């Protein structure tokens, strides 16, 4: 999959901002700071999504059009500790109305920080997303920060992860070095253009 064009299409702050999907869609979800926006930027090859340490602005679903036929959705970070109860409720309502009926959605990419994966919040998100029934791909981001021993531990931990079967693939990844990029792109291509639906 070779990306020539990637443009921001719109942001949805509230349920009523969501527009019907018009092409195959992939959603990027995960904890705040796991690196969702960095993974998107790494895949497209330039700085498309905003990367930041602290969410300074109102969280929104950001829709990007990839070439002319596919859409990627950058979800606001889930479970940011400093966010209020009100904002968390808003996240859930927005996410729920998106996932509940999204025929154009072909897969969900769960971005995790490989140093801590899977965290209790990752587990919570997996459980919460499961009933919607979309294919999932796990991305273990930031593997560049692991030494060989830590990496072996991570691989053992993921191999015995009880929720592992829910994913079509779990990929070690680094938005910094580009490790895993070809593998993830080919999975996205497969989900968008070859099924499994
Ligand atoms: N070392 C390293 N840092 C990363 C990687 N991916 C993201 N980061 C850093 O992690 C922080 C959060 O990234 P961001 O993409 O904003 O995460 P998001 O909140 O999930 O969208 C930023 O400081 C990034 O520079 C990676 O693969 N390796
Ligand atoms: Mg982000």
Image: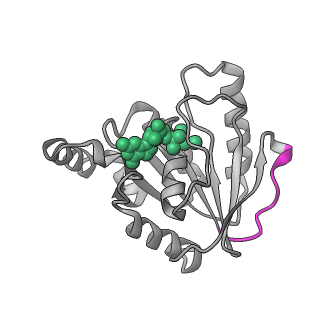
Q: Residue at x 62, y 55 (%)?
A: 48
Which residue, as the protein is rendered here, is positioned at the far bottom?
Answer: 194
**Residue closest to the eye, 98 or 153:** 153
Q: Residue at x 45, y 73 (%)?
A: 186
Work out whether 89 lies above or below 166: above
Residue 56, image x and y in percent?
66, 28
Q: Quadrant of residue 177?
A: bottom left
Q: For residue 128: magenta?
A: no
Work out whether 120 lies above or below 51: above
Badge count: 0
Q: Is residue 113 visible?
A: no
Residue 61, image x and y in percent?
70, 46
Which residue, as the protein is rendered here, is positioned at the far front?
Answer: 46
Could you tell whether 164 is left or right of 152 in the image?
A: right
Which residue, as the protein is rendered here, is positioned at the far left?
Answer: 149
The region drawn magenta spans 16-24
Could you tell whether 70 is left or right of 160 in the image?
A: right
**Residue closest to the eye, 140 or 164:** 140
Q: Is residue 104 visible?
A: yes
Q: Quadrant of residue 73?
A: bottom right
| Colour scheme in use | one colour
Residue 160, image x and y in percent?
24, 48
What main secondary structure does the magenta stretch of the protein show?
Answer: loop
Residue 31, image x and y in percent?
50, 37
Q: For residue 21: magenta?
A: yes
For the C terminus, the quadrant is bottom right
Q: Residue at x 68, y 35 (%)?
A: 91
**Residue closest to the eye, 41 or 156:** 41
Could you tell whether 102 is left or right of 112 in the image?
A: right
Q: Residue at x 66, y 19 (%)?
A: 84
């Amino acid at each position: 999959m070779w990306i020539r064009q990637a443009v921001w299409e719109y942001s949805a702050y509230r349920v009523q901002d969501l527009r019907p999907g018009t092409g195959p869609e992939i959603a990027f979800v995960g904890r705040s700071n796991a690196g969702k926006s960095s993974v998107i930027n790494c895949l497209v090859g330039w700085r498309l999504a905003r990367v930041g340490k602290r969410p300074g602005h109102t969280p929104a679903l950001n829709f990007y059009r990839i070439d002319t036929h596919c859409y990627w959705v950058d979800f606001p970070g889930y479970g940011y500790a400093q966010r209020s109860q009100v904002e968390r409720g808003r996240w859930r309502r927005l996410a729920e109305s998106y996932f509940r009926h999204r025929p154009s959605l072909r897969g969900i990419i769960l971005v995790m920080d490989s140093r801590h994966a899977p965290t209790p919040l990752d587990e919570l998100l997996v459980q919460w997303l499961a009933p919607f029934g979309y294919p999932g791909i796990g991305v273990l981001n930031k593997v560049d920060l692991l030494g060989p021993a830590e990496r072996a531990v991570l691989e053992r931990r993921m191999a015995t992860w009880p929720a592992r079967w829910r994913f079509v693939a779990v990929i070690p990844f680094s938005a910094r070095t580009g490790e895993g990029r070809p593998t993830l792109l080919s999975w996205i291509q497969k989900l968008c253009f070859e099924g499994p639906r």
